[in-house]
Image: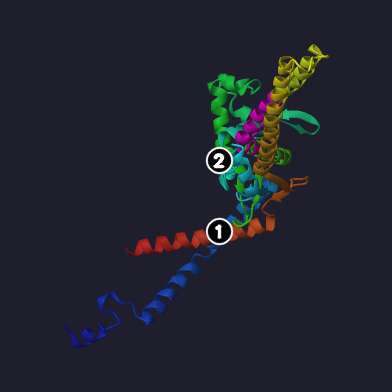
């Protein structure tokens, strides 16, 4: 090998390393290559601009209904003074609510098939006319046109008892619930430290978004409160029946005392046996009075616990017309389309040039 040629292979090129001078030269050659394709790049950018502009024109606006509320649940340490008193009477009022739907679990309720199905099958007012929410959803999404080639779905409706729905009806509802969970409904806590819950509904139909948000919040929150307080409500109902029963016995005993006294109005004081029926009735009255007093106390404590376990759900903001509109502006869409067209074209030219070098 020639000595001069050997000297040209310096440390900068040994082992495949690229020198700064080589990098500058390659950058200049690549820039020159892109300049030669400037017309193509400009055409692709213009095409992207037109696509973005067309998208903003033909894309229907998406409305956003926002429903926020605060959820305040029971404080487990609240009735300590009453708990001790109730335990003496044989009533346990601590921890009645358990862990059902505790904390963030209410968020999962909004995603459940049962809650969304109940909301879809509920009736709301649209332009002053009652209509099922599911029918409104089917109409503005033009689903019936997609079902025209399916005879079993052509005249399908969702009237009647949901428990008696056939396979086709259940299948459609399952598909709608899945789609709503993915594209329509979003439930979250904006701040994890707070008890504020935000329900967002996105839809092309403004009235649907508003009514769906209102109905699903009412449906889920009502179910939440009912389930949360079910055991304590049953306890109150049982205690109320027992208290009414003891009161009835007490009234009967009081009447018995009066009847026994009337049976011997002028009893001979020397004959003690004549006073026995009246004294027995008086003992029954005393016992019934003591039991009734205990039952009343237990009932009132149980009602206090029921009020304590009932969650407070206070709306903060409810959706009102006009709703928020999520729509990409024409100028912004055109700029984004232009940038995307230029970027994709340059990337394609870069890949094409790299492949051609191999």
Q: Position of residue 267 (x, y in %)?
A: 80, 14
| Quadrant in which the C terminus appears | bottom left
Direction front: furthest residue: 270
Q: Quadrant of residue 356?
A: bottom left
Q: Nearer the viewer, residue 268 or 4?
A: 268
Q: Position of residue 226 (x, y in %)?
A: 64, 35
Secondary structure under the numbered disc 2 in the rendered image:
loop
Image height check: is 123 above or below 63?
above
- Disc 1 target residue: 340
Mark yes or no: residue 147 visible: yes
| Quadrant in which the N terminus appears | bottom left
Q: Residues within 10 Å of mark 1 (few under 14, many from 20)?
A: some
Residue 294 lies within the magenta run: no
Residue 335 as seen in the image, left or right of residue 351? right
Secondary structure under the numbered disc 1 in the rendered image:
helix
Residue 238 lies within the magenta run: yes
Image height check: is 161 above or below 84?
above
Residue 99 as seen in the image, left or right of residue 130? left
- Disc 2 target residue: 100
Q: Position of residue 180 (x, y in %)?
A: 59, 39
Point 68% across, 27% down: residue: 287
Image height check: is 265 above or below 22?
above
Q: Nearer the viewer, residue 241 or 351?
A: 241
Point 64% across, 42% down: residue: 309
Q: Tell me where the magenta segment starts and ends, as one range.
A: 225-246
């Amino acid at each position: 090998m020639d000595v001069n040629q050997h000297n040209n292979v310096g440390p900068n090129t040994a082992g495949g390393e690229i020198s700064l001078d080589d990098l500058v030269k390659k950058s200049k050659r690549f820039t020159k290559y892109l300049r030669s394709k400037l017309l193509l790049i400009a055409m692709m950018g213009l095409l992207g601009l037109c696509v973005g502009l067309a998208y903003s024109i033909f894309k229907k606006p998406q409305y956003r209904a926002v429903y926020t509320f605060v959820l305040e649940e029971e404080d487990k340490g609240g009735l300590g003074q009453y708990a001790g008193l109730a335990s003496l009477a044989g009533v346990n009022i601590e921890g009645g609510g358990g862990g059902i739907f505790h904390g963030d679990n209410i968020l999962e309720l909004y995603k459940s098939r049962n809650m969304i199905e109940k909301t879809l099958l509920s009736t709301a007012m649209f332009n002053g006319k009652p209509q099922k929410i599911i029918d409104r959803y089917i109409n503005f999404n033009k689903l019936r046109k997609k079902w025209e080639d399916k005879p079993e779905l052509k005249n399908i409706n969702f009237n009647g008892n949901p428990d008696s729905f056939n396979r086709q009806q259940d299948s459609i509802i399952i598909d709608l619930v899945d789609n709503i969970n993915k594209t329509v409904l979003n439930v979250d806590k904006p701040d994890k430290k707070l008890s504020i819950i935000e329900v967002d509904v996105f839809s092309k139909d403004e009235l649907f978004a508003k009514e769906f948000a209102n109905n699903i919040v009412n449906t889920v929150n009502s179910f939440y409160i009912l389930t949360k307080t079910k055991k304590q409500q049953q306890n109150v109902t049982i205690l109320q029946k027992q208290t009414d029963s003891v009161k009835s016995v007490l009234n009967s005993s009081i009447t018995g005392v009066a009847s026994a006294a009337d049976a011997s109005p002028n009893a001979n004081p020397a004959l003690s046996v004549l006073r026995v029926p009246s004294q027995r009735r008086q003992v029954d009255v005393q016992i019934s009075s003591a039991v009734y007093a205990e039952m009343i106390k237990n009932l009132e404590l149980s009602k206090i616990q029921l009020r304590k376990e009932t969650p407070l759900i206070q709306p903060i903001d409810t959706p009102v017309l006009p709703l928020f509109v999520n729509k990409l502006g024409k100028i912004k869409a055109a700029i984004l389309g232009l940038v995307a067209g230029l970027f994709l074209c340059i990337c394609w030219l870069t890949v094409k040039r790299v492949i051609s070098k191999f």
